[in-house]
Image (spheres, rainbow, N blue to C red):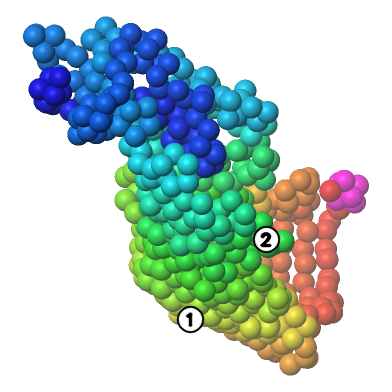
Amino acid sequence: MKKQLKGKKNKLTSTGFVMLIFAFLIGCAGTGKISSFQMDEMFVRAGFKLHTADTPKKLDFLKSLPQNELVHKTYNEKMFYFYADGSSCQCLYVGDKQAYQRFRQSLKEEQMDAIRPYLKNSLLEKQVAGSVSLEIHYEGDLIKNHHSEGVIDLSQINYTDPSLFEAALHGQKTTLVYQVKLDPYDLTVEKLGLKLGNLSLDARADVHSWDKDPVIKSAEFSSDLPLVDLIPVIPWKLLGTNAGVIREICEGGGSITLSKVVLPEIHLFKLPKDPARLLQKVKLTASLNDITVPLRLSLPKIEGITGRVNLENDVLSADNMQAKLGPLSLPTINIRATNIADQPKVALRVKGSMQVVATSDAKVEKILKKHGLKSLTGLAEIDMSADYDQRKPKNWAANGLLVLKGVRAEAHPASVVMDNLQGEIKFNRKKTMNITAKDITARINQAPVRLSGKLFGIGTPKMLVSAKAYAKQLDLAHLAELLPVLRDLKLGGILDLDLDVNVPYSTPAKSRLNGTVTARNAGFQLAGSDLTVEKGNAEIKLNGNTANIKTMTMQVNDQQVALSGHISNPVRPKAQLFIRSSDLNLDRLHNT
């Protein structure tokens, strides 16, 4: 017999040890009761012969064999399988190839049935179906001390829970690799690896005093999470309609790699009332790869989000974040948030170049056309910082500089071109918003435009408007093509202007208005009304705090109207106007 047992060793899962370890993993092994998993019944039903080591010599020989493993050996040109148990039954099972095949079939059929007693009175009894394949190695006394490692193949398992998931979860390409140790006091998960399609999770943890007052210690894990593959396993029905944005992000693709997540000590019977408190002690290192975030208000999506995220000591930082907003490549973004579990304070820093990616890309062209542009090129440098404190939400602060360099835009469908847009825009906000524009210049279909000025205290009683503006032969219809917000006005006509204005809203008498405005063949139409103004010609001269209308003629709903006079005090206007019309039909004006 000893000679027959030498040869190649072939490990095979046996029902007794498979079910013992599975029960052990769900907390049942410590009882030492394994009557549901009697190996001898499985072997005998399959046709294995039982040989008992009933003498010391036979027992010594039995213990010299590989223990608790099914091994095979060819003898007289026939394949035989042997299973030795020198500690429990002190016996040897011997079977031929047919017995081995019956044993494997029996194992496959009975795996889930053997587990079900441990799921009795649990929802899992009805929610789990299918079979598992396992390869397990176990060492222990079957009473108090256990050590096991192995691989569990869940590919044939289906899990159904209509209250959480939209469809049944199928275990396709799902494996669980583990290495655990259990004694009367501690459970040590030395290794736990889950592979679910392209999703993966690797974890380890210690559970102290597991049978009385369990405390999770030294728990850490890492994971690769392709977002599209997350969709089937997220409990959308539990999350409700508020999870719509999360789903859109997942559908956009990309992945999150959790390089390392370290959990704090967790007393399972003394969990904090606010689980967010645990977040204060979590340590996390992660990377974002090509993620897309949808925006509202018809704005393009933020795409290609890539960068590093760290969480430690209740401080979340996102470093060197890169992304695209429609056709624009965004500058580098850095975010730091403190006190995130309570009332976070957020600091944002944006610095770098913002430029248009290749417009030959069909997707980019579609986005540009949606916003009224055929092409957009050029460069902008931005350096901005912002701070927000949730405890004082109205006191957010921002400061930044935007430098435009050679920006060129062509409208769609009309071929109106804004060329060589350049200049600087500064902004800051502490208690109020202030904006400064310096040397903004461009040409709109060759018509030169210049703008410099500042808006201080925007939206407050002390707002200040100070600006210089210049335009020559500017076609208002062309301007509307470049600014879609103006298109509904159906602007038309030619505009010349050369203005220098300074309007302090708190002291309007000190307003300073200088310059001229000339319009030729101007017109517009108010959206949602029947009011149409055409063939407008005007010459306006600004001096001091007064706008003098030297001449203004127009057709209002096809009726000729002439206007002259002056308007003073731009904050609280006072007007003296002289209006002339040879045959004015008031009913037509009233209908507007």
In the picture provided, is 148 more to the left or to the right than 76? right
Let me know if residue 261 appears in the view.
yes
Sequence-wise, which precedes: disc 1 or disc 2? 2
According to the picture, the residue beneath numbered tag 1 turns out to be 438
Q: Amino acid at mark 1?
A: Lys
| In this view, 208 is above or below 362 | below
Main secondary structure along the magenta-highlighted residues: helix
**Mark 1 and mark 2: Cα distance apart in space:** 61 Å
Say whether residue 587 is magenta: yes
Name the residue rendered at 44%, 53% in the picture.
188
In this rendering, the label closer to the viewer, 1 or 2: 2
Mark 1, secondary structure of its residue:
strand
Q: Amino acid at mark 2?
A: Lys
Name the residue rendered at 67%, 39% in the picture.
238
According to the picture, the residue beneath numbered tag 2 turns out to be 270
Let me know if residue 331 appears in the view.
no
